Amino acid sequence: MTNPDLYRVVLENDRVRVLEYLDAPGGRTSPHRHPDSVMVTLSAFRRRISTGDTAVEVDLPSGVARWLPAQEHAGRNIGETATHSIFVELKEARPASTAPSPAPLGPSPA
């Protein structure tokens, strides 16, 4: 796991891995990969998510769940509050009938 000072494994079995993520304003991650995941925000936060030459800024309230399609990215806390969230990473392969489309960077509401 990359950034072990920021991520903590809460639960892991053969179907899912649940991670807790916590950083302070200005904190950043090195490039890393998430499989298809659900992210639940435990705090409101603002982050810049980037991959290559593409970057998006996300501003999320506390207590929301967002779908995070499989992606590689790096992130930086650009807000004034800690980023605190839970990731439920799926280990099962995507069904063959749902071919992946270009995934948006960062979390999506659907």
Image (tube, grey):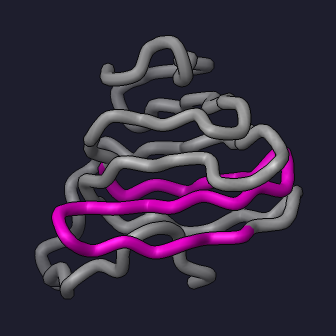
Q: Which quarter of the figure has residue 13?
A: top left
Asked if residue 99 lies left or right of residue 60, the reply is left
Q: Which quarter of the figure has residue 69?
A: bottom left
* Residue shown at the point (58%, 34%) measured from the top left: 27
* Residue shown at the point (31%, 42%) measured from the top left: 91
The front one of 70 and 11 is: 70
Asked if residue 61 lies left or right of residue 21, the reply is right
* Residue shown at the point (34%, 27%) measured from the top left: 14
Q: Is residue 2 above or below residue 95?
A: above
Q: Position of residue 40 (x, y in %)?
A: 71, 53
* Residue shown at the point (66%, 30%) measured from the top left: 23
Q: Which quarter of the figure has residue 88?
A: top right
Q: Position of residue 62 (x, y in %)?
A: 87, 57
Q: Position of residue 8 (x, y in %)?
A: 56, 17
Which region is colored magenta? 35-59
Quadrant the N terminus occupies: top left
Q: Position of residue 58 (x, y in %)?
A: 61, 71
Count of numbered marks = 0
The front one of 88 and 75 is: 75
